[in-house]
C-alpha cells in the first residue's frame, strides 16, 4: 500500500505561479526575467488591494511582496493573506531596499519565510525562490500522503469490519461458540507477539505479521458455511463419512478465499487467511488434515491458529459437552506438545497461560 501511495503523489511538477505585489513595474520586469525562464508564471499587482481581490479567482504557489520603510502596505497585505486559511501556508518572501533589522523582524513575525534586499542578484533570487517552492511542494506531498494514509486506514478498517461480520455469519451457524472469533483473534495476536520476542521464529515475525494474523484468524472456519446443519450441529459423535464432510470446510474456505486472492495477488492479509483456513487442522507430527503436513512445512500462522483454536474449543461449552477447565486444558496442550502442536508455540502458550485464562473467563459469556 505504501508503494501505491508513493506512486500517487509522484505527480509531474506544474509551473509555479508567483504573485508579485509591488508598486514598481521595473521590479516586476526584473523578476520576470529572472524567473519565467525557469518555469514560473508571474502575476503582477501594483498594490495589496488588487492582489487580494485577485485571490478570489486563483491561488499562487508563492508571494513576492515589496515593502518600503514609509509604505507599510506590504505588511498589511501579508497580515491579511495569513489570516485567510486558504493561503496560510503559502510562502511569502519580502522584497525591500531597506535592510534594517527592524523591518526584517516584523516581516518574519507576520509569517514571511524570507527577506530579499534590493538590488537583486539574479542567482540569489532564483535560488531562494526555488528553495521555498521546493519546500512548499514537499509539504503538499506530506499533507497529501497523510490524507491518503488516513483514507486507506479508514477503507481498511471498513473492509476488516465487513470481513469479520461475514466470518461471524459462518460462526453463528455453530450456535454454541459464543465469542469464539474474538477470543481466538486475541489468542493469535498474543502468541505471535510472544513468538516474535522470544522463539526460533523471532526473525520471521514483525509487526505486520502480528497485525495480519490478528485480522486473518477469524477466517479459519469460514468454510463451515457449506457444511450441512445435520453435521455441523450434531450432538453425537460424527460417523466417518460425516467427519470427512466436516473436514472439507478447510478446503472450501481456502478455495473461496483463493478466488478473491486471484484478483488481489500479493495481499498478505488474504494470503494468510488462506493459510489459516486450509491448514489450521494440520498437526506437528503429520497426522492432521487436509494434507498431512509435518512440522515446519505447516505455515506458522496455521500452527499458531491450531493451538489458539483448540484451547478455545476445549474451554467453551458445545452442543454435545460442557467446557473444560483451564488446568485440564493446559495438561492436554502439554500432552500435545511435539505431536499436535509446535513445541515453540506450546512454550509461548505456557508463558501466556494466565492471560489466556483471563480472556477465556471474561469473554466466555459474550
Image: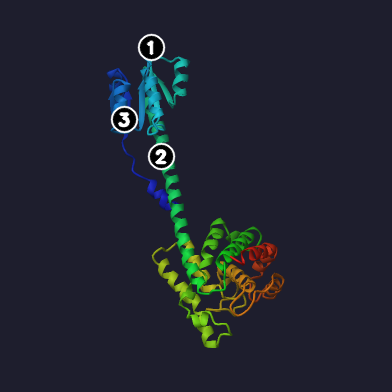
Q: Where, quadrant-wise, is the N terminus in this rendering?
A: bottom left
Whether residue 121 is visible, yes or no, is no
Q: Nearer the viewer, mark 2 or mark 1?
A: 1
Q: Nearer the viewer, mark 3 or mark 1?
A: 3
Label 1, secondary structure: give it. Answer: loop
Residue to which mark 1 is pinned: 70
Q: CA distance from mark 2 to mark 3?
A: 19 Å
Q: What's the residue at 60%, 59% (across, down)?
A: 203
Residue to which mark 2 is pinned: 140
Residue 328 image offset from top left, x and y in percent: 71, 73
Q: Earlier in the sequence, mark 2 or mark 1?
A: 1
Q: Earlier in the sequence, mark 2 or mark 3?
A: 3
Q: CA distance from mark 2 to mark 1?
A: 36 Å
Residue 334 image offset from top left, x and y in percent: 70, 73
Residue to which mark 3 is pinned: 55
Front-lying residue, 15 or 149: 149
- 233 up-or-down from 82: above or below: below
Front-lying residue, 29 or 65: 65
Crowding at dot 1, Cα within 10 Å, few <14 / some 14-19 / many 20+, comes out as: few
Q: CA distance from mark 3 to mark 1?
A: 26 Å
Amino acid at each position: 500500500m505504501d508503494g501505491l501511495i508513493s506512486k500517487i503523489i509522484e505527480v509531474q511538477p506544474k509551473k509555479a505561479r508567483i504573485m508579485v505585489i509591488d508598486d514598481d513595474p521595473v521590479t516586476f520586469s526584473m523578476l520576470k526575467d529572472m524567473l519565467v525562464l525557469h518555469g514560473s508564471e508571474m502575476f503582477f499587482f501594483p498594490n495589496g488591494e488588487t492582489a487580494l481581490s485577485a485571490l478570489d479567482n486563483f491561488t499562487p504557489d508563492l508571494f513576492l511582496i515589496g515593502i518600503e520603510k514609509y509604505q507599510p502596505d506590504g505588511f498589511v497585505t501579508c497580515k491579511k493573506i495569513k489570516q485567510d486559511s486558504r493561503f496560510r501556508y503559502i510562502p511569502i518572501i519580502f522584497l525591500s531596499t531597506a535592510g534594517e533589522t527592524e523591518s526584517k523582524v516584523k516581516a518574519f513575525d507576520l509569517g514571511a519565510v524570507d527577506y530579499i534586499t534590493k538590488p537583486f542578484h539574479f542567482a540569489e533570487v532564483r535560488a531562494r525562490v526555488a528553495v521555498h517552492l521546493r519546500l512548499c511542494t514537499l509539504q503538499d506531498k506530506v499533507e497529501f500522503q497523510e490524507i491518503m494514509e488516513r483514507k486507506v486506514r479508514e477503507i481498511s478498517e471498513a473492509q476488516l469490519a465487513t470481513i469479520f461480520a461475514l466470518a461471524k455469519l459462518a460462526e453463528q451457524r455453530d450456535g454454541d461458540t459464543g465469542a469464539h472469533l474474538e477470543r481466538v483473534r486475541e489468542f493469535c495476536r498474543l502468541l505471535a507477539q510472544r513468538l516474535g520476542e522470544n522463539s526460533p521464529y523471532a526473525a520471521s515475525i514483525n509487526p505486520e505479521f502480528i497485525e495480519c494474523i490478528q485480522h486473518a484468524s477469524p477466517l479459519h472456519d469460514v468454510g463451515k458455511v457449506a457444511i450441512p446443519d445435520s453435521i455441523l450441529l450434531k450432538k453425537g459423535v460424527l460417523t466417518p463419512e460425516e467427519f470427512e464432510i466436516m473436514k472439507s470446510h478447510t478446503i472450501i474456505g481456502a478455495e473461496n478465499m483463493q478466488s478473491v486472492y486471484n484478483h488481489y495477488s500479493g495481499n498478505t492479509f488474504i494470503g494468510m487467511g488462506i493459510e489459516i483456513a486450509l491448514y489450521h487442522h494440520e498437526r506437528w507430527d503429520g497426522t492432521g488434515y487436509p494434507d498431512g503436513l509435518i512440522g515446519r512445512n505447516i505455515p506458522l500462522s496455521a500452527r499458531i491458529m491450531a493451538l489458539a483454536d483448540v484451547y478455545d474449543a476445549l474451554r467453551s461449552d458445545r452442543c454435545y459437552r460442557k467446557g473444560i477447565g483451564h488446568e485440564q486444558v493446559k495438561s492436554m496442550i502439554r500432552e500435545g506438545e511435539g505431536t499436535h502442536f509446535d513445541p515453540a508455540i506450546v512454550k509461548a502458550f505456557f508463558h501466556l497461560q494466565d492471560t489466556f485464562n483471563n480472556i477465556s473467563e471474561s469473554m466466555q459469556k459474550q
